[in-house]
Amino acid sequence: MSDLSALEKHAYRIRRFALRMGEVQGQGYIGQALGYADVLAVAYCHAMNVRTKEPEWEGRDRFLLSHGHYAIAHYAALIEAGIIEESELDTYGGDDSHLPMSGMATYTAGMEMSGGSLGQGLAIAVGMALGLKHKKNPAFVYNSMSDGELDEGATWEAAMGAAHHRLDNLICLVDINNQQADGPSGKVMGFEPLVDKWAAFGWHVQRVNGNDLGAVVAAFDAARSCAEPKPRVILFDTLMGKGIPFLEQREKNHFIRVDPPEWQQALAVLDQSQS
């Protein structure tokens, strides 16, 4: 098992990179980045098999960012993993930047798909996982998605397809922060009981606190080592704005705009937590 103190530092830096990008534009999906940082730290600094200087290596594990608006979080993880240079950070969201505000595979090293319209990633992941099976490539495909995508019919069609094809090389990561642009996810479209639903669709299911690094590591390890010939899903309950109390407490933090001094205040609070 990876050193949890090292993973904590990776998660801290991912949060810090995301905040710095948010400051460049003065706004962004920072709540999601802060809440999901622990999952991304474990994915890129513990679980996944990647080569930092060879992002298109055929033997790599694939990470699909279905929720394309989480790009700011993904870029932060790619910077921490050494796949993107930290110097790119200051270009976030600008003209000709390699870091557009929504994830685009043609722009950014390490991005496996272009996201935006929610509910597309899992179907793409099923195709990738099936293709790897046919090529006898042992790599895993990780599909990262939001709880809002549970509203999409295509998600559940893909879930059935994955189980039908016994895709034990597919791991779906679902961020359950219970917030969408229109309000709490569970009120926009009730999706519980999620564990029972995914199990009924033929998946190996785990649900953990996505901000508990030990639990996240154990869940990734269990998903990779599961002996059952079925796809795996990890449901992560996360807190939007995690680590920055004045952002955690906002009633609506799906897309955050803050006053200029607040970015430095957020960075100071984050840095203080590491002192």
Image (cartoon, rainbow, N blue to C red):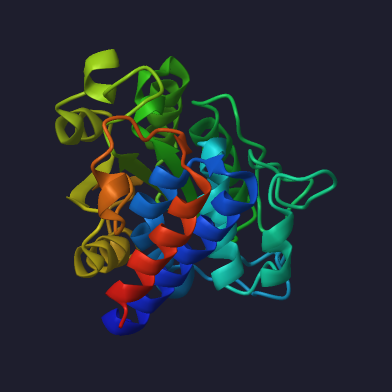
| Corner quadrant of residue 221 | bottom left
Q: Is residue 213 above or below residue 234?
A: below
Between residues 194 and 212, which one lies in front from this camera angle?
212
Residue 158 seen in the current view = yes
User: Where, quadrant-wise, is the C terminus in this rendering?
Assistant: bottom left
Residue placed at 47% from the left, 51% from the top?
142
Q: Position of residue 204 (x, y in %)?
A: 25, 46
Between residues 8 and 253, which one lies in front from this camera angle?
253
Residue placed at 69% from the left, 51% from the top?
92
Between residues 273 and 264, which one lies in front from this camera angle?
264
Q: Is residue 258 above or below residue 118?
A: below
**Left or right, 219 with reference to 28:** left
Q: Is residue 129 above or below residue 102?
A: below
Residue placed at 33% from the left, 30% from the top?
252
User: Where, quadrant-wise, is the N terminus in this rendering?
Assistant: bottom left
Q: Position of residue 45 (x, y in %)?
A: 45, 73
Q: Position of residue 30 (x, y in %)?
A: 45, 46
Q: Is residue 199 above or below residue 89?
A: above
Between residues 240 and 237, which one lies in front from this camera angle?
240
Residue placed at 55% from the left, 50% from the top?
22
Q: How many numbered circles are shown? A: 0
| Corner quadrant of residue 182 | top left
**Left or right, 173 with reference to 85:** left
